[in-house]
Amino acid sequence: MILSDKRILEEIEKKTIVLSPYKRECLGSNSYDVHLGKWLATYREHILDAKKHNEIEHFEIPDEGFVLYPHIFYLGVTMEYTETHAHVPFLEGKSSTGRLGIDIHATAGKGDVGFCGNWTLEISVKQPVRIYKGMPVGQLIYFPVEGEIEEKYNQKKSAKYSGQPDKPVESMMWKNRF
C-alpha cells in the first residue's frame, strides 16, 4: 500500500516524514517530486574495483546546464534533504525524465526506515541530454511498514550512507568484507 497525499501530509505534520525544502506544489496524489541538486560527480578511474575505495570528483552544474553523455556514469544528488522514520521510501524517476532517456538510479531506488540525508542519484543516459540544477528528476513514494522496526537505518553502526550530504557520495562497497 502506498501513502496518499493526505497521509503524506499527516506524516509530515507528525515529523515521521521530513522534506526540506518542502513545497506543497511538489506533492502529487501519492508521491512527492524531488529535484536535481547543483552537484554532480564522476569517478576518477575508468575501471572501478569493488574492493577499492573508488574516489570521485565533484563539479557544480552551471546555470546554462550540463550535457550528460552515454557511457559515462554520473552521480547526482537530490536538492531535497529527506528523513523517513516510519515508512519505506522509494525513489522513482519521473516519466518526463525517463522520456528524455535519463535513468536516475541503477539499483538503489529503495531507502530504509531511518534514512536521513540527500539521495545520491546513479545517473546514466541513452543519448546526450542537457540537464539543469533544480529540474524535477524523480518522485518519492512511501510504503507503510508491517511490524515493529528493531533498529532504524540511522541507528545502525554499519550504515554506510547515513546522513548523506548535499553532494553525491561514491560507492562504499569497499567497506564490506568479501
Image: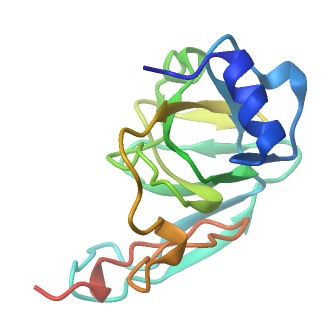
Measuring from the top left, give residue 83's x and y in whole percent.
67, 54
Q: In this view, does 143 lie to the left or right of 17?
A: left
Q: Is residue 171 above or below residue 88?
A: below
Q: In this view, does 29 lie above or below 106?
A: above
Depth check: 147 or 21 in front?
A: 147
Quarter holding the C terminus is bottom left
Residue plotted at (50% across, 72% down): 161
Q: In which quarter of the image is residue 168?
A: bottom right
Q: Is residue 99 above or below residue 92?
A: above
Quarter holding the N terminus is top left
Residue plotted at (87% across, 46% down): 21
Measuring from the top left, give residue 52's x and y in whole percent.
28, 89
Outermost left residue: 178
- Give the total number of marks visible in the rendering: 0
Residue plotted at (63% across, 72% down): 163
Outermost front residue: 148
Residue 75 seen in this snapshot = yes
Q: Is residue 40 left or right of residue 90?
A: right
Depth check: 91 or 55 in front?
A: 91
Residue plotted at (68% across, 67% down): 167
Outermost top residue: 29
Q: In this view, does 33 lie to the left or right of 75?
A: right
Measuring from the top left, give residue 2's x and y in whole percent.
49, 21
